[in-house]
Image: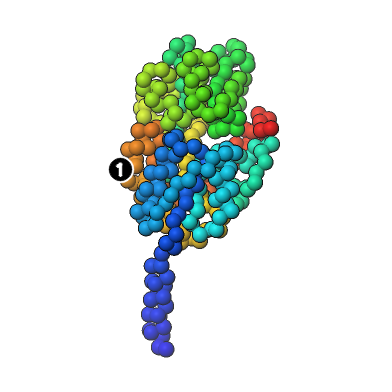
Amino acid sequence: MPLVGLALTVVTLQAATAQQPAFSDRPIRMNYGFAAGGSGDMAARLLADVATKVLGQRVVVENRTGANGMIAAEATARSPADGHTVLFCTTGNMTIITELPGVQLSVNPATELMGIGQLLRSTFGLVVGKESPYRSVQDLVAAARANPGKISYATPGVGSVQHLSNEILSQKLNIKMVHVPYRGSQAALHDLVSGRVDFSLTNLGDIISHVRSGSLRLLALGDPLGKRFFPDAPMISDVAPGFETYAWFGLCGPTGMPAAVVKRWEEAIKAAVEDPAVSEKLLNNGMVPAFTDAAALAQTMEKNRRDYREVIRAANIRVD
């Protein structure tokens, strides 16, 4: 065959390969490890709707609850790495849980799952009840220093992003506070509003309506993206230089997914972030659309594991 003909054949084969769909006609399952109805579940379903259009196959969200999201993580890791089963993953079940002593893992997210892309960041804020005497983070810090081990903070559980964020803050400021863990965010917020605990450093998605209604008072923000919602609020880093905290939500899948499949999913996530209706719904619920690709998400997860590992060891946190 002449060289020109051979070159044309190669180009034709390459083009045909590139045009082949990355997915079969089987439905695609997006596992989510927590109950329906919350802000994370809403975000997963928004992504699934856009992905259905981009990928040309129906994407179904399945709520596989239990074990702090690890039931869903295990189901995903045990599935074929062909992109037909993915996990709507979070900071907690991809980075924190691998570093917590005492946790028995059926799968290791650090090695058996891989990041596909980030959909959003859940920015954090520090809030107190409306009757609280504390008007600023400086007030809280002063009270904690004057009364070591007396100021209390609420979180949705031991080893949560909220718990570790408070531990990082305590270590940076060299103060001692009392951790009051609850079974979920709603119970924690109930006691915060009623004044049974002093404050909470948690995601805006859970507290934004309470702040706007006046039942909670926002003292400061945990990362700059929170300025999208409260442009005049101070930053916690004004008091604790270098402090930043937020959670992320994104998509993960079984390790070993083909590059072409990962690329198609990245396109779907990016399309969701750029969809005005999706962005509006996320922002209305205190979440900031923020796309990153698989490589960037892998870097984020590695940094999270390193940072959380340090604070867990320093605070001697474990789950029994």
Task: Give how far across and how far down residue 84 sits, in percent.
Answer: 48, 56
Q: Residue at coordinates 58% horizontally, 43% vertically from top-left?
A: 70
State the count of labels: 1
Query: In the rendered structure, which amino acid carries the disc numbered 1?
Result: Pro
Q: Nearer the viewer, residue 80 or 229?
A: 80
Task: Give how far across and how far down residue 135 sits, in percent.
Answer: 45, 14
Q: Nearer the viewer, residue 188 or 26?
A: 26
Q: With respect to residue 249, does 196 lie above or below?
A: above
Q: Nearer the viewer, residue 41 or 134?
A: 41
Task: Find residue 278 and report its image quarter.
Answer: top left
Task: Find residue 21 and report its image quarter.
Answer: bottom left
Task: Find residue 94 and report its image quarter.
Answer: top right
Task: Give how far across and how far down residue 315 sits, in percent.
Answer: 65, 29
Q: Residue at coordinates 45% horizontally, 54% vertically from top-left?
A: 28
Q: Nearer the viewer, residue 297 or 213?
A: 213
In the rendered image, the residue lying farthest to the bottom is 1
- Note whether residue 112 is visible: yes
Q: With respect to residue 129, does 34 lie above or below?
A: below
- Note whether residue 224 is visible: no
Q: Residue at coordinates 39% horizontally, 32% vertically from top-left?
A: 286
Q: Quadrant of the N terminus?
A: bottom left
Q: Residue at coordinates 53% horizontally, 43% vertically from top-left?
A: 64
Badge 1 marks a residue whose secondary structure is helix
Task: Give how far across and how far down residue 249 sits, in percent.
Answer: 47, 41
State the residue position of label 1. 276
Q: Quadrant of the C terminus?
A: top right
